[in-house]
Amino acid sequence: MDNRPIGIFDSGLGGLTAVKALRELLPEEDIVYFADSGRVPYGARPVEQLRRMAVQDMDFVANHGAKAIIAACGTVSSNAPDLLAGYRLPVFGVLRPGVEAMSRVPGSAPLGVIATAASIRSGAFQRSLEERCPGREIISAACPDFVPLIESGHSGAEDEAVCEAVARYMRPLKERGCAAVLLGCTHFGIIGEAISAYMGARVRLISASACAAEKLRDYLAASGLTGGHGREKYYTSGSAGDFSRLAATFLGRELEAAAEETGVMEC
Ligand code: DGL
């Protein structure tokens, strides 16, 4: 039994897809969440900067008492896997759990992966999928417009700007008949309905966030580290008002308390 919180971080709203999944799996756990909204989007940043930010983000939630961490950011998970693996606390990235889930998709049709520009540029998703899914064609696409749209409050399946961007990025994956698409950026689950509506109900969308939350649940159970009171504390390096409002919309409930502003770290 361990009542310390689970630390979750992302560049902004995306990690809330991990919060949502975790809440369903482990409602009693406490969560400390860091949204680095002052530096979003991570996907447009160079790798060395991303690696420094990864350590700052892990340190932030570790210094707020976390017992384990979800790096709920595909960009960090794919550009700094060694830093996550070598950290002083157990850290669960979203790359490996997502790829493992994709390897269980039956059939021989191609598999798709969508993520930020920095994630796709790292080649980590493509490489890991090729290793874990031998014989399957992997089609990857960077979708740099999704995160700024989501962070500015666009999300619904009827939202015109979202639908236009989804069609623009997803067309090649649809035309090639992908059996499943890995949402390799945690933000993309927020526009999951629009992506699913465009791709069609037969194409499975796999949330890398949800897969990471399952891994963490298994780890806590196996190590006897579950425990907490279902509390949540949010921090953001951006505007507390904007984050709290958009977070409540996505989670479908008000935050227990508005997010606290941290100021922007230098990197
Ligand atoms: N949500 C993050 C990811 O999973 C970062 C997106 C961004 O800030 O570009 O990649």
Image (cartoon, helix red, strand yellow):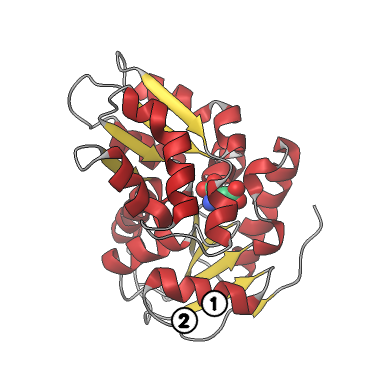
- Res. 40 image quadrant: bottom right
Q: Is residue 56 above or below residue 235?
A: above
In the foreground, 216 or 165: 165
Q: Is residue 47 left or right of residue 32?
A: right
Q: Is residue 102 left or right of residue 236?
A: left
| Amino acid type for the residue under numbered disc 1 | Ser
State if disc 2 and disc 1 touch (CB < 8 Å). yes
In the foreground, 52 or 242: 242
Identify the residue at the far bottom of this view.
257
| Amino acid type for the residue under numbered disc 2 | Leu
Q: Residue at x 76, y 71 (%)?
A: 263
Q: Is residue 219 above or below residue 264?
A: above
Percent coordinates x, y for residue 183 in the rendering? 40, 43
Percent coordinates x, y for residue 32 in the rendering? 52, 71
Q: Is residue 141 left or right of residue 213?
A: right
Mark 2 sits near ligand 1, with its Cβ under 8 Å away: no
Query: What whole-number distance in Å separates the C-alpha atoms at marks 1 and 2?
Result: 7 Å
Q: Is residue 29 above or below residue 105?
A: below
Percent coordinates x, y for residue 129 in the rendering? 39, 26
Q: Is residue 246 above or below residue 56?
A: below
Residue wearing tag 1: 244
Secondary structure state at the residue bearing disc 2:
loop
Residue 198 in view: yes
Percent coordinates x, y for residue 147 in the rendering? 56, 51
- Which of the two discs, 1 and 2, labels the residue nearer the N terminus? 1
| Label 2, residues with CA under 10 Å away: few <14, some 14-19, many ≥20 | some
Q: Which mark is residue 165?
A: none
Residue wearing tag 2: 255
Residue 4 in view: no
Secondary structure state at the residue bearing disc 1:
helix
Identify the residue at the far right of this view.
266
